[in-house]
Amino acid sequence: MKPGSPLLRSTGCQRSWRWFFSAGLLILEVFALRKTQAAHHRHMIQLTAVGTGYSVLELSAISLIDDVEVVFYNKAQKQIAIKIPWVSKLVGINYLTQLHDLLVSHEQHFHWTFQFLLLRNNTNPDRNHTAQLLGECEVDNDITVKSHAHLIWGGKESYRIDEEVGHWENIDPDVKRYQHVLERPLWTNLRKRYMKLFCVDIMRKIVEYSSIRDNVAPEVVVSQHVSPEGSIILSCIATGFYPRSIIMHWEKNGKLGIWGNESSSGTLPNMDSTFYLKVTLELPPEDSGAGYTCVIEHSELKSPAMYSVPRKTTKNKPWILALGIMLAVMILLSCAGVFIKWKMRKTGMHVRREK
């Protein structure tokens, strides 16, 4: 076959189209996988110290990703316990060594904190006191949506900071005079570095590698009832779902709109670390409640799920209830009268026989 012949050019075009088609499919698969793995994740780190003005008696740290314990540390053992085996290999020995050294150094930091606060407040240094440092960060589709730190003294929150805002908010007025210490450049730079490295970055690395726990689709119940005032109350409950991120809204005949007063419980945790959400819609009495659906979007649902509201329940009217009670009383009295007459007749017959 001669070079440049129509058949050869046709074969070359077919190969090019096959290559482009295969490459296109590969790109789509990569984007689909990325979309599947992208979700809302939360990381919480809590350090707790118990001590006096002279020493730190107890120090522990716990790390939870998506409400699953990943790391634990305590002062007695001075060792980091990784609760999920593959996490150790993923983060590497250098990271674990760095984390261990940081936790050991925090013992001295807490010791200084106890001394500083107890002496400044003229508090008995022999008594035990509790100090806590809580860090929280959340990502949603690879975007950091939350990065907060909280300082807690004696079980009472003293300060909190939103990294997006960038300055400490005083919660407890009794310790307000220490805010300038927290906002010094040294502590500010350390806080930013630690929150990024040990909260946000390590969470991303772990959840991008593998899921910490199995995802679960929501169980949904939709109902309605009539309030004492006559308004129609629609309720949509989603529970047992994981991860936390979920979207729930009402539609009427397939359209979005403002149909009444809508309220939400907010996404709340269940005892098994899954989540719960309830959304209610209060409609005016003239609205029959027909045509409404609860629409739910969750990562474990292939597409938005629609749940129709069941038929309107019949409202019990007072006059119907009163009539029912009156009929029941009348039937009861009639039965009692028949029984008394029968008893009297029987007694009279027995007396005549004795005579």
Image (cartoon, grey):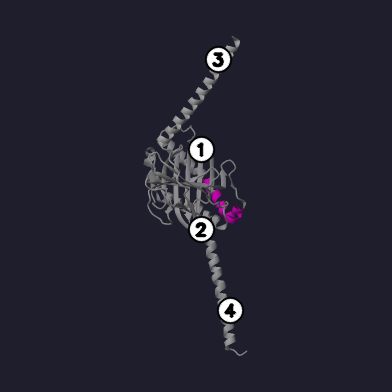
SS at badge 2? loop
Q: In which quarter of the image is the C terminus?
A: top right
Question: Closer to the observer: label 4 or label 1?
Answer: 4
Q: Is 33 placed above or below 174 here?
A: below
The chief SS type of the magenta part is: helix
Residue 2 among those drawn in magenta: no
- Numbered label attached to residue 15: 4
Give x and y (percent) for residue 193. 47, 53
Question: Closer to the observer: label 4 or label 2?
Answer: 2
SS at badge 4? helix
Report whether residue 194 is seen.
no
Question: Closer to the observer: label 3 or label 4?
Answer: 3
| Residue drawn at (55%, 73%) of the image | 21
- Numbered label attached to residue 50: 1
Q: How far apart are marks 3 and 4 (CA)?
A: 114 Å
Give x and y (percent) for residue 317. 41, 37
Q: Which of marks 3 and 2 is nearer the N terminus?
A: 2
Q: How far apart are marks 3 and 1 (CA)?
A: 90 Å
The segment highlighted magenta reads 86-105
| Residue drawn at (57%, 15%) of the image | 349
Q: Which amino acid does label 1 sit on?
A: Val
Give x and y (percent) for residue 321. 43, 34
Q: Distance between the residues labelled 4 and 2?
A: 36 Å
SS at badge 1? strand
SS at badge 3? helix
Residue at mark 2: 303
- Numbered label attached to residue 348: 3
Q: What residue type is labelled 2?
A: Ser
Q: Nearer the viewer, residue 176 or 264?
A: 264
Q: In which quarter of the image is the N terminus?
A: bottom right
Q: Is 322 placed above or below 208 here?
A: above
